[in-house]
Amino acid sequence: MHIAWLGKKSPFCGNVTYGREITNALLDRGYQVSFLHFAEAETEQEKWPNCPEVLLPFIYKSQVYTIPTLRSSKVLMRSLQELKPDLVHASLTLSPLDFLLPEICEELDLPLVATFHPPFDSKIRNLKSSTQYLTYQLYAPFLAHYHRVIVFSQIQRDLLIKLGVPAEKVAIIPNGVDEQKYSPGSSNLKYQLKAKYLFVYQGRISTEKNVEALLKAWKHCQMGDDCQLIIVGDGHLKASLELYYGQEHNILWFGFVPEEERRIDILRAADVFILPSLVEGLSLSLLEAMACGIACLATDAGADGEVLENGAGIVLNTQGVTTQLKILLPLFRDHPEMITLLGQKARQRVLERYTLGQNINRLEKLYAEILEKKQFQLSGW
């Protein structure tokens, strides 16, 4: 089977990780994959994927959205005509091209699958008053014309159905992580930093990630020199936050870490992973931390609360994050047995529900169902 994958390779974000892991796994299972993405040839030569690539012209792109050029749709259509894939899978990049895909694929008679990533607050009341809800409202009429739409949780599915996407088209396939690659292991980082406990945040430094709530709580708690907080990631708030929350508070800013091996090394050294987001989809950073056997705290944003439910971690309310962390941070410092137990439970939860292999199995089944239905229709039945 030949899959034309439309996704992102840069700038680094969860969508990039998702595309990399899924396409590499499909290639490992013998699928033919062509990777189509917004890029300029001279600036983006990452090592993955090991398959043909098509570069689509763009005006601007960020971690959140992309603005294509007017000719990008023509480049896409011509490329799909030449590639002749069996199916198109779009890991939606929040660009105007997303809205043209159903029309393009219908003209070429190509089945079209979308993975819909936009974050949300899990509380419907909060969601409906947010810009994220507007994104769902904007996309729903177009997603109704895709053959399948993949989301990460029941809440997302229910919302899209309420907004008019046919129920039979919305499939829940949670993110998955490679549990062999992301696993407990040794790391020298804690020794290098002369720390007894390492607390880690990994993700964008932006408003919706609510990092300052964590920083305020950490500064208030005065955790001591034995405890250090590592902030991994970059974003528009990094420079201003770094001025007020620095090494004098045992906060280390690692910035963007492009090497996956280095990020895994950081996670293996960590004791506690904290994700204070106001909105989320299903955080791959959280799943990676859990797979490495780290005690995890995350807000009930997106599907993250569902991931940690029933004791796999600590679920925080999206309101009053700083207040909750002021209580919990010293508790983890003073009770290391909690760290050990929650780390074990986190790893076990990933093995039960969120492995990359389980994700790919479900995806293969979905692809097969779509192509079988197409063959059935072609046969005249």
Image: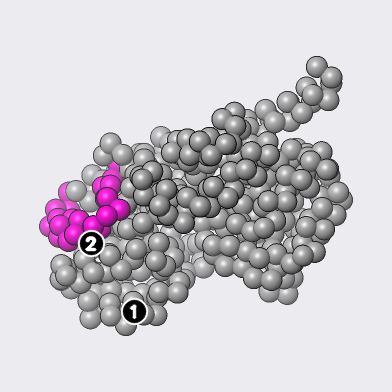
Image quadrant holding the N terminus, namely top right
Question: In 3D space, how far apart are the residues under numbered discs 1 and 2 (Cα atoms)?
Answer: 18 Å
Judged left or right of residue 342, residue 122 is right
* Residue 332 painted magenta: yes
Disc 2 marks a residue whose amino acid type is: Thr
| Residue 79 can be seen, yes or no | no
Q: Which residue is mark 2?
A: 322
Image quadrant holding the C terminus, namely top right
Q: State which region is magenta.
A: 312-337
**For the point 65% across and 45% down, which residue is it?**
142
**For the point 73% across and 30% down, which residue is it?**
371
In front here: 348 or 247? 247
* Residue 194 painted magenta: no
Disc 1 marks a residue whose amino acid type is: Glu
Question: Can you tell which of label 1 and label 2 is closer to the viewer?
Answer: 2
Query: Is the stretch drawn in magenta largely helix, strand or loop?
Result: helix
